[in-house]
Image: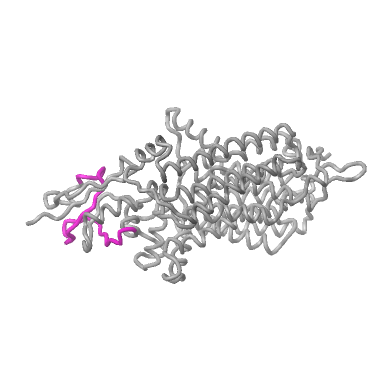
């Protein structure tokens, strides 16, 4: 016997979110962060450095090197995408860092679209439908599915951990988009053929080539089981999809083996409690506010989860979320692993909407309203203090945390920030009105607030964030010591990010240190000095400067000039 569904939804509650409003929200979330900023420390600028090396044909495509160092992540696809973008984009049209961001912005758009359509097809499942009323008036399946999908997209945008990591040109954004494509493919299999097949191949192979073959294999195996157990699907349709899923999973595993992408990445937590505490904090804020709603879904739909019918609309996002959380607890970096589970977590959160009580929805609204309004007010006050010096205390704090920073004024940034703030006020006014029918209403303020905060940071605070998070100021200080034409520069102990920053921001020709080198300048990381005598004869070098990063007391570069013989 099929357990009763907990969703009780009327037709008036599934009125769709206006498409223009949803599109505007997505644009406001995607574009800021990809436009107008420098590559940031450290994964962002490191990935960009490898892409630049490949585009300029200075390293092999199958074994890229940056300063003689191989990538920390084995995935090759992200570097290929960036390098191809640089090569095909005219230099007069876009700068290299902007050309790289175009395909990665498209990947974020694909993530949002795949999440929406995946949840839409899950909500069309028989077990996901709301209770049928005795005299009619319940939500019809297409409108209900559209409303649930709108809620899932709002929940994804509202997740606090998505903002920064989804705007970096790293392998993790490629993994995120490929995971979302795989999620969509399995969700849409009972309803479509061509689009899920394409998404399945691209998602599985892309996830493997982006450096996550184990994750691709786990998601593929779990998806095979879910397709086999899917209720309401004919055997004629399930068998081809089962074979296709199994075949592409095997192919992806073989590709990873052929390219030597398999690595043991499981690490244990430290013996003390600090690591577990940091993981707990990460789990708490990274997926907020989707994870409380996801837990509510697990509770209200528990009978369907444990029933023999195997309801895909619950088990599929639950499996994707479980794999991501397991990777978060056992691998590093933890936040990057948790990022891949956000689309599935948003899907679980969306199925909580038909079961939320009005008091819970009101609590979400009030908390979100206070949190994002106070945050936006703080961003504006600090920006005004940077521009005018009033209030004095925020201006003094900025000067202390970012010594040497000179505030910049941009009329365009101000106009965009004012428009975003006005949009937030309109959204709050709409939510406070009597229009309480749509089931996605409880996630409008969280998504709008997250987009508002991101837009304000990427407009009003962008010069400050560039100064604090990029290597530009430090590299310019190094250039001032080296002079106009330093020739080749030897390096000792530099990280991949430092090498990429010196090559791009400083346009320097770097060579790894050696006793036989003829370069007149040497740049070393302070923690790596003095270097081994096999690499550098310290007696032959005269220290010229110690160049710190203005916002990091532990990141210093030493600049040496070859001593006169």
Q: Residue furthest top?
A: 273
Q: Residue at x 27, y 52 (%)?
A: 477
Give residue 342's quadrant in the image: top right
Q: Residue furthest right?
A: 135
All told, the count of numbered labels is: 0
337 lies above or below 479: above
Residue 53 lies in the magenta stretch = no
381 lies above or below 201: above
Q: Residue at x 71, y 44 (%)?
A: 440
Point out residue 276 in the picture as x, y percentages from the top left corner: 48, 31
The front one of 90 and 243 is 90
Q: Is residue 123 left or right of residue 62?
A: right
Give residue 107's quadrant in the image: bottom right
Q: Residue furthest left?
A: 565
Point out residue 378 in the picture as x, y percentages from the top left corner: 50, 39
The front one of 338 and 377 is 377
Residue 510 lies in the magenta stretch = yes
Q: Is residue 211 visible?
A: no
For the N terminus, which image quadrant?
A: top right
Q: Is residue 134 visible?
A: yes
The front one of 344 and 489 is 489
Point out residue 155 in the picture as x, y percentages from the top left corner: 64, 44
411 lies above or below 128: below
Q: The magenta stretch spans which residues?
A: 505-530
Point out residue 495 in the picture as x, y percentages from the top left corner: 32, 50
For the C terminus, which image quadrant?
A: bottom left
The front one of 506 and 173 is 506
């Amino acid at each position: 016997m099929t357990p009763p569904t907990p969703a009780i939804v009327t037709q008036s509650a599934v009125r769709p979110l206006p498409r223009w409003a949803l599109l505007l929200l997505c644009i406001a979330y995607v574009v800021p962060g990809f436009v107008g900023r420098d590559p940031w420390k450290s994964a962002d600028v490191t990935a960009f450095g490898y892409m630049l090396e490949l585009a300029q044909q200075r390293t092999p495509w199958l074994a890229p090197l940056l300063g003689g160092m191989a990538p920390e992540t084995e995935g090759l696809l992200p570097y290929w995408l960036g390098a191809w973008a640089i090569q095909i984009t005219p230099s007069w049209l876009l700068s290299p860092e902007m050309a790289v961001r175009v395909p990665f912005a498209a990947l974020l758009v694909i993530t949002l679209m795949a999440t929406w359509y995946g949840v839409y097809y899950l909500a069309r499942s028989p077990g996901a439908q709301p209770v049928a009323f005795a005299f009619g008036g319940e939500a019809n399946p297409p409108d209900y599915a559209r409303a649930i999908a709108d809620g899932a997209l709002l929940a994804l945008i509202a997740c606090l951990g998505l903002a920064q990591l989804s705007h970096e040109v790293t392998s993790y954004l490629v993994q995120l988009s490929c995971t979302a494509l795989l999620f969509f493919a399995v969700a849409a299999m009972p309803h479509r053929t061509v689009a899920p097949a394409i998404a399945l191949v691209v998602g599985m192979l892309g996830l493997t080539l982006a450096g996550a073959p184990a994750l691709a294999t786990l998601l593929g195996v779990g998806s095979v089981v879910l397709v086999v157990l899917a209720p309401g699907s004919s055997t004629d349709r399930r068998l081809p999809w089962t074979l296709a899923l199994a075949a592409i999973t095997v192919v992806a595993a073989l590709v990873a083996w052929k390219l030597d992408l398999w690595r043991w990445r499981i690490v244990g937590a430290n013996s003390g409690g600090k690591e577990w505490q940091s993981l707990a904090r990460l789990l708490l804020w990274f997926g907020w506010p989707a994870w409380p709603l996801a837990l509510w879904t697990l509770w209200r739909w528990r009978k369907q989860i444990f029933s023999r019918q195997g309801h895909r609309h619950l088990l599929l996002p639950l499996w994707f979320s479980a794999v991501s959380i397991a990777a978060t607890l056992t691998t590093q970096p933890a936040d990057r692993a948790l990022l891949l589970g956000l689309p599935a977590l948003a899907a679980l959160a969306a199925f909580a909407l038909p079961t939320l009580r009005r008091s819970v929805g009101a609590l979400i609204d009030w908390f979100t309203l206070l949190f994002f309004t106070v945050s936006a007010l703080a961003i504006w006050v600090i920006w005004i203090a940077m521009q005018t010096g009033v209030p004095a205390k925020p201006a003094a704090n900025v000067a202390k945390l970012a010594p040497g920073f000179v505030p910049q004024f941009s009329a365009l940034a101000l106009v965009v920030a004012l428009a975003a703030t006005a949009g937030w006020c309109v959204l709050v006014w709409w939510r406070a009105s009597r229009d309480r029918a749509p089931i996605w209403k409880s996630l409008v303020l969280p998504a709008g607030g997250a987009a508002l905060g991101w837009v304000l940071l990427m407009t009003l605070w962008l010069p400050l964030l560039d100064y604090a998070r990029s290597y530009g100021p430090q590299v310019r200080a190094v250039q001032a010591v080296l002079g106009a034409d330093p020739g080749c520069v030897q390096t000792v102990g530099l990280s991949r990010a430092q090498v990429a920053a010196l090559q791009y921001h400083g346009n320097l020709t770097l060579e790894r240190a050696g006793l036989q080198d003829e370069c007149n300048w040497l740049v070393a990381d302070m923690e790596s000095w003095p270097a081994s005598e096999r690499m550098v004869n310290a007696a032959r070098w005269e220290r010229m400067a110690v160049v710190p990063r203005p916002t990091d007391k532990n990141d210093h570069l030493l600049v040496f000039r070859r001593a006169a013989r």
